[in-house]
Amino acid sequence: MFLRGYISRRAIVAAALVISVVLSISPTLFSPTVKATKLLVVAPTSFIDLGEPTELTLKAIDELGNLDADRDDLVELSLKPVSYSKAMAELSSTSVTLRNGIGHVHILGNVPEVVDVVATWRDGRSPLESSSVRLFIGIGEE
């Protein structure tokens, strides 16, 4: 009985030592993985110059805004007009496949207007909440 208690304490101390070493060497080994829940549309500015293609970035993010680099989802893009009955601006593509959680598309406007760019999840590991950004094309800040 004395020997059994001695071995148990010794085993516990050894296990604790091993765990401490592993955690100090590789803290990221046990960090939680990012799980995206929504799409994010990012523009370099809300004010877009006329006749200048502007790159928009799409990201798959979690609730804290962290990028989920494991996402390779298909995302559909659309323009929702605010100024006119039909959006005059054009997107370089209406669908984008995210690579490592990120995708890119360009918008070009030749007429002053306000549009919302809407990103909607279409296919992938799990659904992502839609997102939009309002852009002022040829209006305001220059």
Image (cartoon, grey):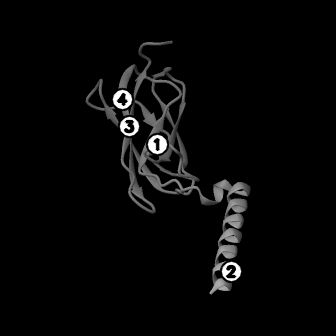
Q: Name the mark nearer the viewer: 2 or 1.
A: 2
Residue indicated by mark 1: 64
Which residue is the extreme one toward the bottom?
Answer: 1
Image position of 43 (left or right of 85): right
Q: Name the mark nearer the viewer: 4 or 1.
A: 1
Residue indicated by mark 4: 115
Image position of 16 (left or right of 104): right
Please rate how many residues cluster around mark 3, counting C-alpha atoms within 10 Å: few if below 14, some from 14 to 19, many from 20: some
Task: Please identify the quadrant where the N terminus is shown.
Answer: bottom right
Which residue is the extreme one toward the front?
Answer: 2
Callout 1: helix, strand or loop?
loop
Residue for point 38% across, 57% down = 127
As drawn, 37 above or below 18 = above
Callout 4: helix, strand or loop?
strand
Give the CA separation, mark 3 to mark 4.
10 Å
Image position of 51 (left or right of 121): right
Q: Amino acid at mark 2?
A: Ile
Give the image location of residue 128, x and y in percent. 39, 52
**Are circles 3 and 1 on residues that touch, CB within 8 Å?**
no
Residue for point 34% across, 31% down = 87
**Are circles 3 and 4 on residues that touch, CB within 8 Å?**
no
Callout 3: helix, strand or loop?
strand
Residue indicated by mark 3: 132
Give the image location of residue 26, x and y in percent. 70, 57
As drawn, 7 above or below 64 = below
Q: Name the mark nearer the viewer: 3 or 4.
A: 3
Q: Looking at the image, is mark 4 or mark 1 earlier in the sequence?
A: 1
Q: Amino acid at mark 1?
A: Leu
Q: Amino acid at mark 3?
A: Ser
Give the CA separation, mark 3 to mark 1.
18 Å
Give the CA separation, mark 4 to mark 1.
27 Å
Residue indicated by mark 2: 7
